[in-house]
Amino acid sequence: MVSRVHRVERMQLEDEQHILIVSRTHETTLDWLYSQGLLVEEADCPNVNCNDHQLRKIKDPYTADIQKLRCSNCRTSRSLRWQSFFHDHKLTLMECIQVAFYHFIRQTQIKTVSKEMKISERAVSRLYSEVRTIISLYMEDLKVGRQLGIETDDNGDAIVEIDETLMTHQNGLQMWVLGIFDRVTKDFWCWPVPDRTVETLIPIITQHVGQNARIYTDGWQSYTRLSREGYDHRVVPHVNGFGSGENTTNGIESCWSELKRLTHHSHGIQVNANDPIASLQQYVNVGCWRRQFKNEDLCRSLIEILTHYYST
């Protein structure tokens, strides 16, 4: 009998392999992109004087995609990729979906993708970056209007664990990340922070954790303010591990281990020196996305994210 974990792994592998099958030819690639809503077969004509006619796909052997969108009324035309995620990319559509839906999801190193597919590292890196950006935006949008430590367990308790970790050293800087793990919902949210002072950590916590939550942390001095903020704050000394029973931070320690594996696996974290906090936020958001959807189809999740932000 196949265990649930093995079934999940097998399902994901088959879904990823399916990307290679549907992208073997330009025709099958187009069929798949249309079926998933990643390209549209018709759209509103952008000509304001066209009386609401539609752009519709037509054959065009003189374009790289062999099809384009054109209005039968005013003859306005647009690329088949118009208003889609693929609009500004020079790669073929076959290459785009293999990079985004196969190699990115499998966390293949950029150099390996470039060598295997015979395309430039710059093109792969750019596509990786744009996928990372849109996933990060999605994860940020999931937080809007929500707080952790709101839902309660069978005992009526709302419990979160809070900790900070050193995520990476770059350009001579230690880059820390604050994390909050909700024991009830299993949600895990992260924020890169410039330091670990009271002034930096406490405002993030009070904004994102419900007032009635019980909070478990280690003995870092900045957390002593939590009791003054009205929280039921419990300290777990890390002298002999991460505690046990209810009095523990094992949950968030497990999240850190998983997040670091998911963010460092392919080619590590490459932050932008001009805005290290924002660029690190993207990496940790993608790691949290991989963690949140690890028992589901990451391809399906990415399709839903792209169609949400690029729907016409």
Image: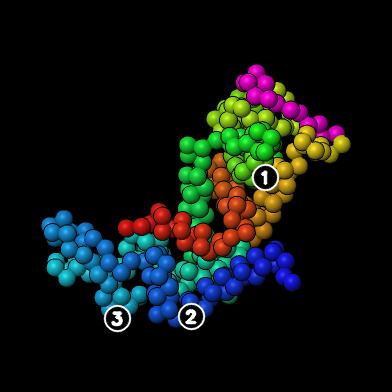
- Residue pictured at 63% horizontal, 53% vertical: 291
**Which one is earlier in the sequence, the residue at label 3 or at label 2?**
2
- Residue pictured at 65% horizontal, 33% vertical: 156
In terms of depth relative to the viewer, which is nearer, 34 or 64? 34
Distance CA(mark 3)–CA(mark 2): 19 Å
- Residue under label 3, please give it: 61
- Residue pictured at 60% horizontal, 24% vertical: 199
Distance CA(mark 1)–CA(mark 2): 39 Å
Q: Which quadrant is the N terminus positioned in?
A: bottom right
Q: Residue 224 in the image: x percent, y percent?
A: 70, 23
Residue 167's disc is 1
Q: Are marks 3 and 2 in contact (CB under 8 Å)?
A: no
Where 18 falls versus 134 (above or below)? Answer: below
Q: Which quadrant is the C terminus positioned in?
A: bottom left
Q: Residue 57 in the image: x percent, y percent?
A: 27, 72
Looking at the picture, which amino acid does disc 1 mark? Met
- Residue 64 lies in quadrant: bottom left
In the image, is 15 to the left or to the right of 163? left
Q: Are marks 1 and 3 in contact (CB under 8 Å)?
A: no
- Residue under label 2, please give it: 24
**Which one is earlier in the sequence, the residue at label 1 or at label 3?**
3
